[in-house]
Amino acid sequence: MTAPLLSLDGIDTNYGPIRILQGLTLQVSAGELVCLLGGNASGKSTTLKTILGIVKPRNGTVRFDGEDVTNRSTSHRIKKGMAIVPENRRLFAPMTVLENLEMGAYLHNGGKKEDFERVYELFPLLYERRGQLAGTLSGGEQQMVAMGRALMAKPKLLLMDEPSMGLAPILVERSFEIIKQVHESGVAMLIVEQNANVSLSIADRGYVLSTGRLVLEGPAADLREDEDLRKAYLGR
């Protein structure tokens, strides 16, 4: 059996005396799209920070691409193949689209021609806007730049933190169409989201966090039909 690309096993995380994550165990396999759902203060952001090495767990193990990275630095994990599209995109607003993409490829000497071509193939609009300042783009366009910037790092695992945040409903739908397109290009993805309906519509599997504990997990299609999840997150 092939080992998962990413695995968290028995993760406990504290902020001072406050226990945030409690026995968290999850996996993402190569080429898989997994969503991590939960409301405010559920522990989603702490999970991402633990995966990236920004927060060190009190107990448990983080493994990535066959290596125990629990005590390794964030930079080591990024060099090994993690990339993130952060909450609210966090672009370099005074820089052009092209310069933002080049920043994503700083580990690869600014990127090769084929790296830019791949991003432009996924996001043709970015080629048209490559000379435009990133801060002048719409929310949906900025999301494309943030995803393109992350893809320039040629990640094995793409982490996305609340990709629907701050977007109008019609742009949320478009954003997740793009996420699905990126996933279909072969990139493994972990999406941290509150919007369960749209996340589960494109994911392979899902996990649901509540106050630092996993309360549900399984194939996305099954979770969409789960009565408790539907009442809590899907509004029906």
Image (spheres, rainbow, N blue to C red):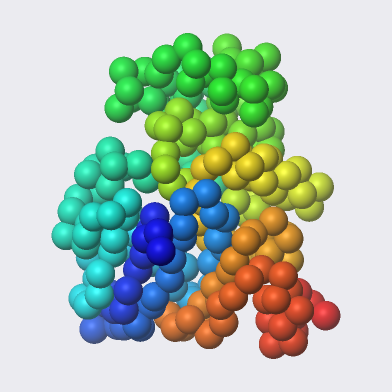
Quarter of the image with the N terminus is bottom left
Q: Is residue 38 above or below residue 126?
A: below
Q: Is residue 84 above or below residue 66?
A: above
For image coordinates 57% across by 25% down, the residue present is 119
Nearer to us in this view, 52 or 216: 216
Q: Is residue 39 visible?
A: no
Residue 154: x and y, percent?
Answer: 42, 32
For image coordinates 40% across by 32% down, the residue present is 153
For image coordinates 31% across by 79% down, the residue present is 10
Side (left or right) of 155 relative to 68: right
Residue 3 lies in quadrant:
bottom left
For image coordinates 64% across by 59% down, the residue present is 203
Q: Is residue 168 above or below residue 41?
A: above
Residue 82: x and y, percent?
Answer: 37, 45
Side (left or right) of 224 relative to 105: right
Q: Residue furthest front?
A: 1
Quarter of the image with the C terminus is bottom right
Residue 77: x and y, percent?
Answer: 28, 47
Q: Is residue 185 visible?
A: yes
Could you tell me how many numbered marks the image carries? 0
Nearer to us in this view, 47 or 108: 108
Residue 63: x and y, percent?
Answer: 29, 60
Q: Residue furthest left?
A: 71
